[in-house]
Image (tube, rainbow, N blue to C red):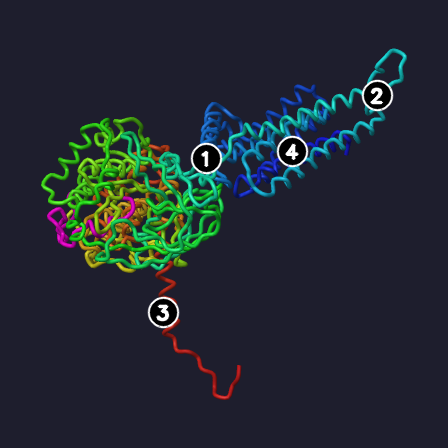
Amino acid sequence: MSGRARLALTAAAATLMASCALLPLVSPKTWLFQAAFLVAVQTGVGAAARRVPLARPLTVAAQALAGLLMLTLVFARDHAILGVIPGPDAFRHFADLLRQGSEDVSRYAIPAPLSDGIRLMVVGGVLVVGLVVDTLAVTFRSAAPAGLPLLALYSVAAGLSDGPADWLWFLVAAAGYLMLLLAEGRDRLSQWGRVFGGVSRAPGGPENGAVAPVRTGRRIGFAVLGVALFVPLAMPSIQGGLLDGTGAGVGVGNGNGGTISAVNPLVSLRDSLNVDEDRQVLSVRTTSDDVSDLYLRIVSLDDFDGTTWKPAQRHITGVPDTFPTPAGLSGDVKRTTVRTSIAAADWYAQDWLPMPYPPSGVKVAGTWRYEPVGMTLVGDHGQNTRGETYQVTSLDVQPTAEQLAAAPEPPPALKKEYTEVPSSLPSVVARTAREVTAGSSSHYEEAVKLQDYFAVTGGFQYDTQVAVGQGEGAIANFLKQKRGFCVHFSFAMAAMARTLGIPARVAVGFAPGTPQSDGTVSVGLKDAHAWPELYFEGVGWTRFEPTPTRGTTPSYTVSDTPGSSVPNEALPSQGTSAAPSASASQSAGCTPQLRKQGVCASPSAAGTVRQSDGGTPWWQPALWALAGFAVLVAPLSPMLYRRRVRARRLGAHDRTPAGVAAHTLAVWQELTDTAWDFGVPPDDSQTPRGTADRIVRLGRLDPVAAESVHRVADAVEQVLYAPRPRLTAGLADDVRRVSAAFDGTVGGSARLRALLAPRSSVRVLWAASSWWARLRERAAAARPALRKPSGQQS
């Protein structure tokens, strides 16, 4: 191997060694292998170009072109010409990925997930640095300045990371740079040339060849020192992600007191709801019998200025061994003690400690402080939740509707603080509140009517793509548009409650997560939530849930006696066919995930389709006609099967709980099969919410169709996890809307295949195989066992 080739390999190795400093920033770390391969290809192209030889600018251009082609092949293959030549679509895709990557960097804490955007930024950045290092050290034979891009790469990682092993990555990067210098020196010596050269300082004076390199070394040393000192200061850092706090110590003095002021967490909450990958934030294990009501509260927003809600500046103290009784809670209200163990992900750096409300005690390591008004814990001097495991003792307060309705007036000071609304609040907010709650006999009845207005009767739709909203008219605009997510619903209900004289604030945290097979509850980014808390004397701060399709409706706001608004269970859904419905069979229509829940073990009696006993042909010509008809129909049988199954799944159903559950699961099965027919294969390992996200993403569905997919997924989660699932109307129409959207997004050949040869029709073969296997098992069990003669030993 020539000296130039060894130098090129050393330059590539030095680049990869410096890029190791980025490893703590992203997880998983498999991107390094991809970057190593691309750097190797780029280095090989440079070595081949220099061997030809090409001019230096052409060599650099060839390497840059090779790097671009490789990035196109890896990241934009579907948007490129022949899968490798970048065109306008490929460059637009690169721009979208870079924009997504920049958003992910600001959204996630370290280590960030390896999304496509972040992967392009990391791998592409390493490739660019590798090109610059190779150009300086090998093409232009100047290894010393090549340390600057290596240092820049390390400085980016050092500016973003705050881990204890940063010094180790500096040593690795420095070792790579020294290897590069030694390789260049060896290459120069191998050519029997002078390593150093220079002129004497004075005519006739002694030659001093070290003057020039020493001067050059000083300049490079000063430049490196400047970059090392000032570049990390200028680099942005990744903060705590979801509901990011101040990022600094909040206590002052000796740590026994002080104040806390917090940033507005609502934009981060919206970003968490819109992530492509629902990462687990917390793993929860609780003694509560009903995990569907396990809200984890982070902070309360009690300062309302007419524009937004935010945490007020509060006094903090040391964490007490036993928390005081929550404000306003009397001894007449039923309560039980719940013990909850929570483990936070090692990337989730949150200043506030998520806990069930109201907490009565907490065991947590680190320096935390207690805020008595909100009954929250906040980290002191940089303390956060990253990797924390802690135990919380809390109260499950169970008031009755009668107790809430009979609540007396709250203390004047509390009422004045928590019913204050600015004069700038649009009058439509108070007017709508009065109209919605007209005829109410108590504040409790007003609160329930407000909750039902947003969640049931008002025609509001859940949409996480709507901006949080700014300005004094944000709530009024939400009441007009009737589209938003939990921030809008909680803000509006709390503001309207205050106009009615009900003390109100907004809580931010996590809605109940997803139960796991090991008894824990997984809480993810998409479980981030905001809800209003209203104060009732004798009960205290009480949760309400105005956001449709999110969380659970509190039991004390739901009447035990069905009202007139509840449909008759004996009647089919309005607008559906009068024909009997049918859920899919256990083997063909119920996924392993749903079957494991035990909710679709057998179809209901109302969902059974009776097959008629067709007559056998009575004469030979009819037999031949039937055979000919079968030959003609056979190619169309998959299409006919899917049409029949679709009609059964989306047909009418009983209004009984069993009928509603069977219908919801059948509709969900039809939705996943429709996506499968259009090229999105099922993944039974995912939750309904994860499956919905995957269908929307891979199917490239428009917002309307995406909303329909999530509505069906939410209904399935209600059936699977809610103690009393709510009836969700219009699910069949949602599936038809999604099917029409798929028709509009795929090409003609894909539409034709979905119609004539739907992939999901393979379920017939699976059902037949399962039936045959069960038949053989029963036959084997019924066969008498062969007994050996007595005395014979095995």
Residue 209 is tagged as 2
Residue 517 shows up from this direction: yes
Q: Which mark is residue 104?
A: 1
Among the two numbered marks 2 and 1 on one chain, the one whose residue lies closer to the N terminus: 1
Q: CA distance from mark 2 to mark 4?
A: 31 Å
Q: Which mark is residue 675?
A: none
Given this view, does label 4 or label 3 mark the residue nearer the observer?
4
- State the residue position of label 3: 778
Q: Is residue 633 visible?
A: no
Where's residue 587, x and y in %?
33, 57
Instruction: Look at label 4 and name its amino acid.
Output: Thr
Mark 3 or mark 1: which is in front? 1
Q: Secondary structure at mark 4?
A: helix
- Residue stretch in magenta: 549-575
Give the crowd class for mark 1: few <14, some 14-19, many >=20 residues within 10 Å.
many
Q: Can you tell which mark lies on residue 15?
A: 4
The N terminus: image quadrant: top right
